[in-house]
Amino acid sequence: MNDHCPSCQQDLAPEPGFYYGAMFLSYILTGWFCLAFVAVVHWVLGWSLISSFALLIAVTGILFVWFFRISRSIWIHINVKYAPKK
């Protein structure tokens, strides 16, 4: 992750522990994704429960970085107001 935004020079690490709240967002996003994913694969596609969870582990392993980045992005957008120069 960059230290500063390349466009507006906003400090993306304002203080130590700033992104601690993003961990909770990531947990919530991942939890809802896992519930929805297993429900769709198990009930809609008709896969067994074990194969649904096996596929979930593979997909979550790939999407972990995306969940991590999107939760950090949501967290900084909640706490920092972006005001472009007019």
Image: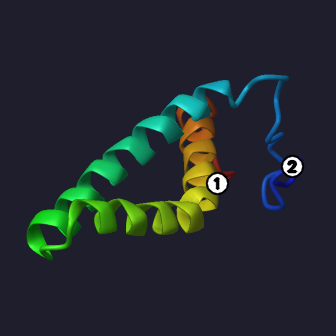
Query: Mark 2, mark 1: which one is toward the viewer?
Result: 2
Q: Residue at x 59, y 26 (%)?
A: 21
For residue 1, the mark is: none
Question: Is 18 on the left-hand or right-hand side of 62?
Answer: right
| Residue on which the image places disc 2 | 4
Q: Residue at x 69, y 31 (%)?
A: 19
Q: Quadrant of residue 66?
A: bottom right
Work out whether 17 lies above or below 63. Answer: above
Judge from the rendering whether residue 58 lies leftward or rightward of residue 4; answer left or right.
left
Compared to residue 47, the image places residue 61 above or below, namely above
Q: Is residue 76 in view?
A: yes
Q: Secondary structure at mark 1?
A: loop
> Label 1 is placed on what type of residue?
Lys
Disc 1 crowd rating (10 Å Cα; few below 14, some 14-19, many 20+) is: few
Residue under pointer 1: 86
Q: Amino acid at mark 2?
A: His
Which percent across, then down, holds residue 33? Answer: 35, 53
Q: Residue 10 placed where, x, y %?
A: 80, 44
Residue positioned most to the right? 3
Gap in angstroms between the C-alphas marked 2 and 1: 21 Å
Q: Nearer the viewer, residue 1 or 64?
A: 64
- Mark 2 surroundings: few (<14), some (14-19) or many (≥20) residues within 10 A: few
Identity of the residue drawn at 17% across and 65% down: 42
- For the question of whether residue 82 can be seen, the reply is no
Q: Using the image, determine if residue 24 lies above or below residue 3.
A: above
Q: Is residue 68 left or right of residue 8?
A: left
